[in-house]
Amino acid sequence: MDLTRAKIRDLRSALDEKKISAAELCGEYLKRIGEQDKNLLSYITVTKEKALSDAENAQKLIDAGKATALTGIPLAVKDNICTDGVKTTCSSRMLENFIPPYNATVIEKLNAEGYVLLGKASMDEFAMGGSTQTSAFAKTRNPYDLERVPGGSSGGSAAAVAASLAPAALGSDTGGSIRQPASFCGVTGIKPTYGRVSRYGLVAFASSLDQIGPIANDAHDCAILLNAICGHDRHDATSARVETPDFTAKLGQPIKGMKIALPKEFYSDAIDDCVKKSVMDAAHELEKQGAILVDCSMPGLKYAIPAYYLIACAEAASNLSRFDGIKYGYRGEGRTFGELIVDSRNKGFGEEVKRRILLGNYALSSGYYDAYYKKALALKQEIIKEYSEIFGQCDVILTPTAPTPAYKIGAQDNDPVKMYTADICTVTVNIAGLPGISTTCGYTENGLPIGMSIIGKRFDEQTILQCADAFEQGFSPVAPKL
Amino acid sequence: MSAFYPTMGLEIHAELLTKSKVFCTCSAEFGGTPNSRCCPVCSGMPGTLPVLNQKAVEYIIKAGYVMNCDISRFTKWDRKNYFYPDLPKAYQISQMPRPVCLAGTVKINVKGEEKVIRINRIHLEEDAGKLVHDEVNRISLADYNRCGIPLIEIVTEPDFHSSDEVIAFLEKIKLLLQYAGICDCKMEQGSIRCDVNISIAPKGSDELGTRTELKNLNSLKAIARAIEVEIERQEEVIESGERVIQETRRFNDALGETTAMRSKEDAHDYRYFPDPDIPPIIFTEEELEAIKNSIPELPEQRVERYVNSLGLKKADADIIVGDKRVCDFFDEATKSYDNPKAIANYIVGELTRRINLGEVDMDALKFTGADFARLVELLQTDKVSQSNAKIILGELVENGGSPDKIADEQDLWIKEDNDLLAKVVDEIIANNPKPVEQYKSGDQKVFGFFMGQANKALKGAASPKAIQDYLRKKLSE
């Protein structure tokens, strides 16, 4: 069976029609991983034995006619989502040997469906970064050009899907960490509305922004995966008590009359011309299908990066304090508690993580709180307000996903501000808690994918999936040559 | 007389009596094998999340009501960030700008005078774990059983000017929290802890002096002693021409002195900010009303009921209400024998005496209120004598059992045996001609002597009334 860009629903029918067994399917993916991941470095841990035994169990369900959407479907899971008995490192020396004794709620849900875990996908250390180059273990490469970054922080998940080393994967998105790597790797990724998916078992970066979501070959597969992982969870007080609709329900419905907003600030000089052109071409494609393009403005966007980095780093500084070398994880040396904690954190964390912890603690310090953190919260309210004004007029918002296509490895290494600024197109969606999906809208002359983002109203994933799917129906993706 | 006037404010931490911890479902019971009562959530494992225990919220609202506080309609939680090995997340979930309760008052009585102490705030937070230092192997071990036990922190205004006021307030708070079912207030187990902020100023001065904070106060006695010692120390500092430094001081009970722990300059910057994992709560009037109505009878109400409805003396009622365990025991006893005065008398006279002597442990009673009530009934209906009742009570305390059975087994009943009574009394009269003469010549005092002799000889086999009647009859012949 040719697994190149194979979709979950194709694999589903192949399994149900007994064209392939769950174990064979799993074996095929493991074989591809064995052959290709040494160049790509998308996985930190490949759970070969567990995968095969998961597949055996799934096959029993399939044979008994009890298969559901994901029974026997192999998936990659980002390495910051806790998996009982399987190392969960967050790409950090700090958690190099950490094996959680519990599953994240999303993993429990996937287990209930009988999915097959292929392995844990690489990422930026503690999800801090947009290149997967801050990983302590696997600096993943872009399948379209191994000299380039796959994006991040869910770069391992996106690269694995793009290279068909998994048909789909779970990522997490705090400021664009699902959408941006999906765009760099030419696949589709959705960040659900804040509260849609339980965060229990997702190692926290910034609790008010983090959300788990799927990365897959198209919007339809994202919808299938989203169906499996959503729902209120009593272990997460921020998970919303809302109905989970069937996210595939609106797929294929015409988008005639759908109002698509194009806020001009997202198409400024900070965005590469090739990206702007590709996204605008896609907009006109949607217009041809009957959508109405609406020009609008989002003046608050200029505050988005400082507001985002203040909130995210402040929460991260506190969230990452628990890594002190006392209970689990990397333990340094020292004669006193203080020395032990300092040494553990000094050696356990990488540079980018330390930079953000310092930034966050600075913003929360007495005397600076009002000037930084409090102001950032005010900006958050302003951004929410501007989004709700736009959504008063329109159904969805269309923006580029990133200012540029995938860049060369090392290009942003010495310029954190430039690296942070590159998140301009994605962070406001997290600040406002909205759902956003990125799908491929074109390729550069060099064949690098370009992504566009469709942003929806709170809890209206159905409409952005419908819109992304409508575009994908008339678009032919190009798989990378490996 | 000292030239200085002390001023104090208190910070009291009380553990709530919820079954489970404040952010997970682990047991909140005291003790346990180290690290047997913790889970991924309260031990701060990566990816885990706190979920607020609604019962704990209910309890702090009750605490607010019993201390006459304003209950915030909007309340939220904050993170207090600091590193210490007993704090697994390296932040404590607490409340900073929006506590559940604000601005309350508590009345106390000091040497017959009533005084009102103002409460500044009460907030809900989680307890930390415990470190055990093994000096021999030179290692420290962490026990996380206590992590996440719900705590309320009660902060008073600086309204205290003597250790007597502080002790009276703590005793009052203890009773209020116990009767409201909020905290068991066992100081020795640390379920209630108190830090004292203390300063002195020249008498007549409007300004407060520089304060120190006293920690490690493990009993009411220690608190009173620490306050005295610290006032003396501050007086000496000022009199020697120096200044009191704002700092935290640790009380050493054995040495009876306070020593500096850390100064204001070393104080942590806790970097408080709103906890993004716990959504704020907005209370409705109905919710608050329902919680208010569920508060059980409080100490003052009980005293009032005992005096007004049951006819107890105020002093007796105060003694009974002064210990909730005794008070609940009294209520239980009156349910099975409707003679509250007699039960109260026997509790105040016999039971509390034995409690004070350390003979009776109210936390480990071997008999019920009903057993005790039956004993009082036997006494009241002349089925057993006073002295035999004491023997029965002793047996109940030691081994438990039923009073009737104990009286059977040890032959402690009044027998109403007239022949025996006549025989014993006649013999006493015959052997004591002199007192008989005295009695007959009008000396009524010697009657007591005959009663004593008869009681001794009869060993409770006859009722005092029967003895009295027979004696009077015989002596008048």
Image (cartoon, rainbow, N blue to C red):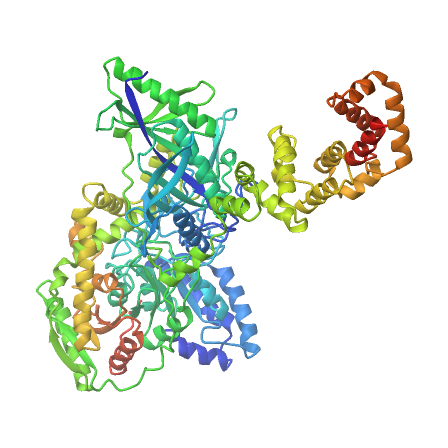
Percent position of residue B436, x then y: 82, 20
Quadrant into which the C terminus of chain A falls: bottom left
Examine the rendering and report whether any part of residue A5 can be seen: no
The image shows residue B413 at horizontal and vertical percentages of 82, 38
Would residue B442 be found to the left or right of residue B158 on screen?
right
Left or right of A115? Residue B320 is right
Q: Is residue A231 left or right of residue A387?
A: right
Q: Residue furthest left?
A: A269
Nearer to the camera, B266 or B376: B376
Q: Nearer the viewer, residue A304 or B310?
A: B310
Using the image as rendered, state which of residue B278 and residue B132 is in the foreground: B278
**Residue at point 78%, 19% (across, down):** B441
Q: Is residue B456 visible?
A: yes
Question: As displayed, is residue B430 above or below residue A404?
Answer: above
Write the residue at 52% across / 24% down.
B136
Q: Picture coordinates of residue A311 (x, y %)?
A: 24, 53
Number of callouts in the render? 0
Q: Residue extending furthest front?
A: B441
- Residue B388 lies left or right of residue A247; in this view the side is right
User: If the image is split into quadrants, where does the N terminus of chain A sit?
Assistant: bottom left
Q: Which image quadrant is residue A197 in?
A: bottom left
